[in-house]
Image (spheres, rainbow, N blue to C red):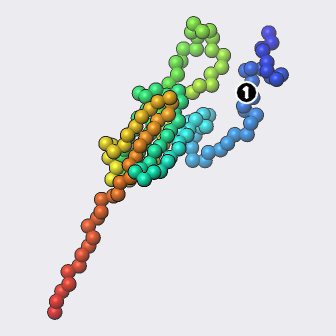
């Protein structure tokens, strides 16, 4: 049986494998495996009050995303799994390109920022964070006392 084709190739061919792969040297390949391109695409905007961070997390649900703040680092992680049942009422699975896995990214926001300062909203596959600018607590300046005599 001949499979339907577009432009002379089978719909099941990995035509994307013919394109050069972009390399991201800072990505942990163990974490992402062959889906290294599935990173958290992020935009950071600065304004007078703070920073607005938009992180693309398509296909994730709110309960699959975690935010934590530790030692001045804001960490965003997302993890999801796929249904392992390859045969269902839709028929036999013959190709799977969606992935299961985990991603994490950290941003240094400073040790003066607390969990209460950060506002987070997730809608339409985009995590929107609002992080205020805060000055670090000033370390008391060392003052010398003059000695007479």
Q: How many marks?
A: 1
Q: Residues within 10 Å of mark 1 (few under 14, many from 20)?
A: few
Q: Is residue 140 left or right of residue 46?
A: left
Q: Which residue bears the numbered disc 1?
A: 14
What is the quadrant of the N terminus in the image? top right
For residue 112, say whether it is visible.
Answer: yes
Q: Position of residue 110 (x, y in %)?
A: 38, 53
Q: Position of residue 100 (x, y in %)?
A: 53, 27
Is the residue 149 above or below the residue 87 in the image?
Answer: below
Q: Residue furthest front?
A: 48
- The residue depicted at 37 percent of the width and 40 percent of the height is 119
Q: Quadrant of residue 121?
A: top left
In the foreground, 83 or 69 = 69
Is the residue 102 above or below the residue 23 in the image?
Answer: above
For residue 71, say whether it is visible.
Answer: no
- The residue depicted at 57 percent of the width and 9 percent of the height is 88
Q: Quadrant of residue 24?
A: top right
Q: Is residue 61 left or right of residue 138?
A: right
Q: Residue furthest top?
A: 89
Is the residue 83 above or below the residue 36 in the image?
Answer: above
- The residue depicted at 53 percent of the width and 30 percent of the height is 58
Q: Position of residue 70 (x, y in %)?
A: 36, 46
Q: Residue furthest bottom?
A: 149
Q: Quadrant of residue 120?
A: top left
Q: Is residue 137 left or right of residue 107?
A: left
Q: Is residue 130 left or right of residue 139?
A: right
- The residue depicted at 46 percent of the width and 26 percent of the height is 61
In the foreground, 58 or 121 = 121
What is the quadrant of the C terminus in the image? bottom left
Helix, strand or loop for disc 1: loop
């Amino acid at each position: 049986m001949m499979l339907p084709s577009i432009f002379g190739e089978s719909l099941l061919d990995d035509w994307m494998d013919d394109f050069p792969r972009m390399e991201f040297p800072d990505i942990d390949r163990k974490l992402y495996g062959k889906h290294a391109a599935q990173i958290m695409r992020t935009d950071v905007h600065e304004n007078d009050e703070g920073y607005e961070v938009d992180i693309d997390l398509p296909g994730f649900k709110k309960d699959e995303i975690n935010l934590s703040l530790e030692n001045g680092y804001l960490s965003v992680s997302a993890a999801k799994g796929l249904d392992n049942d390859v045969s269902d009422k839709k028929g036999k699975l013959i190709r799977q390109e969606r992935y299961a896995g985990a991603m994490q990214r950290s941003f240094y926001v400073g040790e003066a920022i607390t969990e209460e300062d950060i506002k987070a909203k997730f809608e339409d596959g985009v995590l929107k964070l609002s992080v205020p600018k805060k000055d670090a607590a000033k370390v008391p300046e060392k003052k010398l006392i003059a000695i007479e005599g």
